[in-house]
């Protein structure tokens, strides 16, 4: 019924896609010449393409399908909500049951006094909300100059003009004249790539103290907030040294600035707790959420804010901000059902106590492979740094090419794994079972072996 099941042949789909569809973060000429991979269905942790080939999806879509594919409960809830109330807005003194229920549930799940939710359609929009929220928060207390937001180099916070400015990716800033004014970026806690001779603990402290130095440089009376992902995702699954977050928290406690934890990837079980902030003992004033909130089944995101922030914003008159689809009833109903399933099926505990530890053991063992310099993992997000020389933590000369090569071997082997430069990245559905993890590791090793053999043949290794 209405499903695009008997689709056009692959080549025709590719030709139409090339003619009419512009892809995000893609070289247009390249994809149009090569033809896009067409994914037609998915179930559990497995994707199927238009030629019937199956892949283990070790990226959970785009870091989001936490619950795995094919959960009919979510489809049913969406259909019911569409029949009962497909849309109504939450502007103009109005609300509806799904947005009320989801807000209350998120307040329950979120740590500390994070009890109030402002909804968006994804992470970028939510971070745009945060920019306006934190600046308005200080301005409405008579501090309009307190508007600088400190972020980090190589952070990812979205692609709208505001959220991409918060992000620290120079390639993105170069397109479109970013960042917007009053956003600055400090160095990231990336020991493998930038730690030099220091030990990781010492390096973590130093990189945290860069925040203190930046606040002093700008002047505390001009800084509104610091934003960071508990574990950087798109930047390459950068798991910070254990010393990093306690020191950041100390600085945020001592200084009069707000702390925004961007939980778009880390939230909803990914790190073994409901939120990455809990895994690192962080007490944010605002959390950005999206992705796993609905397991990617429908677009929804938001900002969960503390009692104090909400109090100030609420007492400041009208906050002139919001999206047509803020708190969309169908999206809220689906998210609520997703949270119910994550909870009732013990999936966060499964990550913390079963799948996470098992994957960690297997992933860490990949450090024995001649191509792998470091295997990093937190819960169910992980990276492998590929290197031509482990001892010196050297990078490949043609940066990024080895990662791409390894990624193409993964596709051949029926494994979807992403590369960030020459780091291989996974962020699988949280429902992964032991046997799935064994398959994932087997296919990873096969791809690493093929990559290694190819490099050796070409004389690119020491
Ligand atoms: N914050 C974080 C931490 C994210 O990872 C966003 C905000 C933006 O969310 P939306 O829903 O607006 O996309 C993200 C998104 C990648 C990749 O290639 C990562 C993201 C999005 C697209 C690609 O790793 N993360």
Image: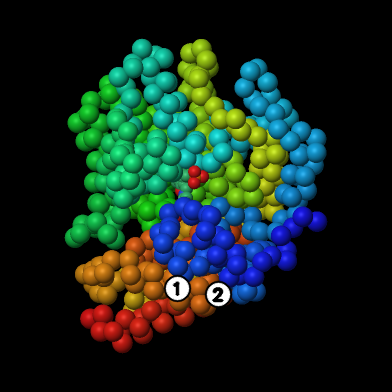
Q: Is residue 85 above or below residue 320?
A: below
Dot 1: what SS?
helix
Work out which quarter of the rendered image holds the N terminus and state it. bottom right
Looking at the image, which residue is at 61% across and 36% down? 106
Q: Residues within 10 Å of mark 2 (few under 14, many from 20)?
A: many
Q: Residue furthest front?
A: 19
Name the residue at 24% across, 51% down: 202
Looking at the rendered structure, which numbered label has been put on residue 87? none
Q: Which residue is mark 1?
A: 408
Residue contact between numbered discs 1 and 2, judged by CB atoms under 8 Å: no
Quadrant location of the C terminus in the rendered image: bottom left
According to the picture, the residue beneath numbered tag 2 turns out to be 414
- Who is closer to the viewer here, 375 or 44? 44
Which of the 4 image quadrants contains residue 399?
A: bottom left
Q: In the rendered image, which quarter is residue 447 located in?
A: bottom left
> What is the secondary structure assignment of the residue under circle 2?
loop
The mark that comes first in sequence, 1 or 2, is 1
Task: State the count of labels.
Answer: 2
Q: Nearer the viewer, mark 1 or mark 2?
A: 1
The location of residue 368, given as percent across then percent down, is 37, 77
Query: How would you rate the neighbour count of disc 1 (Cα within 10 Å): few for under 14, some for 14-19, many for 20 or more?
Result: some
Q: From mark 1 to mark 2, how far is it between C-alphas? A: 10 Å
């Amino acid at each position: 019924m209405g499903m695009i099941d008997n689709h056009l042949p692959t080549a025709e789909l590719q030709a139409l896609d090339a003619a009419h569809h512009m892809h995000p973060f893609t070289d247009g000429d390249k994809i149009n010449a090569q033809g896009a991979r067409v994914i037609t269905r998915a179930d559990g942790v497995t994707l199927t393409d238009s030629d019937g080939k199956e892949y283990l999806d070790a990226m959970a879509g785009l870091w989001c399908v936490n619950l795995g594919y094919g959960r009919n409960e979510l489809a049913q809830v969406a259909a019911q909500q569409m029949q009962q109330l497909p849309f109504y807005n939450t502007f103009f003194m109005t609300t509806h049951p799904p947005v009320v229920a989801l807000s209350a549930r998120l307040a329950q799940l979120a740590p500390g006094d994070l009890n109030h939710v402002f909804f968006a359609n994804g992470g970028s929009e939510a971070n745009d909300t945060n920019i306006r929220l934190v600046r308005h928060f200080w301005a409405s207390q008579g501090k309009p100059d307190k508007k600088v937001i400190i972020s980090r180099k190589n952070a990812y916070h979205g692609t709208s003009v505001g959220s991409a400015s918060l992000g620290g990716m120079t390639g993105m800033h170069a397109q479109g004249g970013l960042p917007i004014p009053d956003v600055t970026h400090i160095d990231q806690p990336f020991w493998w790539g930038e730690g030099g001779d220091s030990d990781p603990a010492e390096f973590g402290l130093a990189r945290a103290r860069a925040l203190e130095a930046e606040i002093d440089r700008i002047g505390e009376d001009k800084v509104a907030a610091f934003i960071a992902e508990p574990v950087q995702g798109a930047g390459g699954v950068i798991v910070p040294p254990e010393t990093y977050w306690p020191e950041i928290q100390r600085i945020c406690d001592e200084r009069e600035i707000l702390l925004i934890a961007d939980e778009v990837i880390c939230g909803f079980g990914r790190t073994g707790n409901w939120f990455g902030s809990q895994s690192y003992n962080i007490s944010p004033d605002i959390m950005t959420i999206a992705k796993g909130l609905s397991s990617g089944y429908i677009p929804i995101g938001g900002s969960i804010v503390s009692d104090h922030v909400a109090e100030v914003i609420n007492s400041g008159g009208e906050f002139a901000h919001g999206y047509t689809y803020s708190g969309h009833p169908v999206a809220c109903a689906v998210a609520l059902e997703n949270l119910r399933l994550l909870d009732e099926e013990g999936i966060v505990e499964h990550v913390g106590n079963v799948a996470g530890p098992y994957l960690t053991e297997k992933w860490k063992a990949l450090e024995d492979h001649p191509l792998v310099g470091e295997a990093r993992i937190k819960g169910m997000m992980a990276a492998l740094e590929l290197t031509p020389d482990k001892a010196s933590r050297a990078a490949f000369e043609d940066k990024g090419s080895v990662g791409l090569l390894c990624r193409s071997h993964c596709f051949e082997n029926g494994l979807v794994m992403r590369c960030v430069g020459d780091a291989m990245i996974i962020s699988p559905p949280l429902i992964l079972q032991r046997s799935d993890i064994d398959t994932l590791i087997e296919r990873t090793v096969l791809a690493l072996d093929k990559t290694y053999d190819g490099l050796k043949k070409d004389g690119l290794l020491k």
